[in-house]
Amino acid sequence: MSTAVTEADVEQVVVDSLESFGADRAQITRDATLEELDIDSLDLAELSQIVEERFEIQLKGADVAEVKTVGDAITLIAGRA
């Protein structure tokens, strides 16, 4: 039985994950770039794994490569979930 995933659900997982990677929670906004938050490609790969497991979706490397901001990540993930 699958439940609908809301953008708020996705945002919570993304923000919590970014914080666990060392980003300052106060700076994690939809407009914040991953570069500003010091999130690197390894962190993005780990984030992909987290959301794939949590929301049972598949993210392609090319899609993730296009992600520049926190909002981009949330929109991509919510669109697939």
Image (cartoon, rainbow, N blue to C red):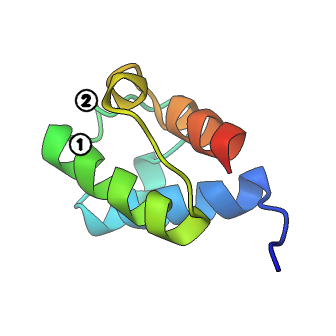
Q: Which mark is residue 55?
A: none
Residue 61 in the image, given as x and y percentages of width and height: 31, 31
Q: Viewed as shown, does residue 63 lie left or right of 3?
A: left
CB under 8 Å between callouts 2 and 1? yes
- Check disc 2 and report the residue beneath it: 35
Mark 2 Cα shell of 10 Å, populated few (<14), some (14-19), many (≥20)? few
Number of numbered discs on residues: 2
When the figure is inspected, residue 16 is found, relative to residue 23, above or below; the finding is below
- SS class of the residue under badge 2? loop
Residue 76 in the image, given as x and y percentages of width and height: 58, 34
Residue at 53% from the left image edge and 70% from the top image edge: 54
Type of amino acid under label 2: Glu
Q: CA distance from mark 2 to mark 1?
A: 6 Å
Residue at 82% from the left image edge and 80% from the top image edge: 1
Residue at 45% from the left image edge and 29% from the top image edge: 69
Which residue is more in the foreground, 58 or 19? 58
- Check disc 1 and report the residue beneath it: 39
When the figure is inspected, residue 70 is found, relative to residue 57, above or below; the finding is above
Which residue is more in the foreground, 43 or 19? 43
Residue 11 in the image, given as x and y percentages of width and height: 62, 54
Mark 1 Cα shell of 10 Å, populated few (<14), some (14-19), many (≥20)? some
